[in-house]
Image: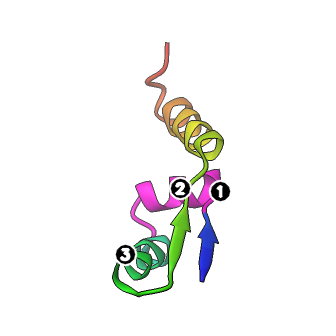
């Protein structure tokens, strides 16, 4: 199984979403499960979290 996380999935995992957390755990624990988080999605998720928390300058 190959899973690609987009920015909303990365943000959900960061905020403690149970389903996103289960996917990450399963990808680590199960043979044949692969999880991908493209850099552009990671940057977008970081920007979204930063803007919502008003931490960016």
Asked whether the residues under the numbered discs 3 and 2 touch, taking CB atoms below 8 Å apart as contact, a structural biologist would say no
Query: Can you give x and y, in whole percent of width and height, for residue 51 in the image?
Result: 55, 30
Q: Label 3, label 2: how many angstroms apart (C-alpha)?
A: 16 Å
* Local crowd size for mark 1, using a 10 Å CA cut-off: few (<14), some (14–19), many (≥20): some
Question: Residue at point 51% right, 39% down?
Answer: 49
In front: label 1 or label 3: 3
Q: Circle 2 sits on which residue?
A: 10
Q: Secondary structure at mark 1?
A: loop
Count of numbered circles in the view: 3
**37 lies left or right of 25:** right
Q: Tag 2, which secondary structure?
A: helix
Residue range highlighted in magenta: 5-17
- Residue at 60 percent of width and 61 percent of height: 5
Q: Tell me the residue that label 3 is attached to.
A: 28
Q: Nearer the viewer, mark 3 or mark 2?
A: 3
| Residue 29 image-quadrant placement | bottom left
- Secondary structure under tag 3 reads helix
Looking at the picture, tell me which residue is in the foreground, 57 or 23. Answer: 23
Disc 1: which residue: 6
């Amino acid at each position: 199984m190959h899973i690609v996380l987009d920015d909303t999935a990365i943000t959900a995992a960061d905020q403690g979403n149970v389903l996103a957390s289960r996917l990450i755990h399963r990808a680590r624990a199960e043979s044949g499960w692969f999880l991908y988080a493209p850099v552009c999605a990671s940057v977008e998720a970081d920007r979204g979290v930063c803007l919502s928390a008003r931490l960016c300058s």
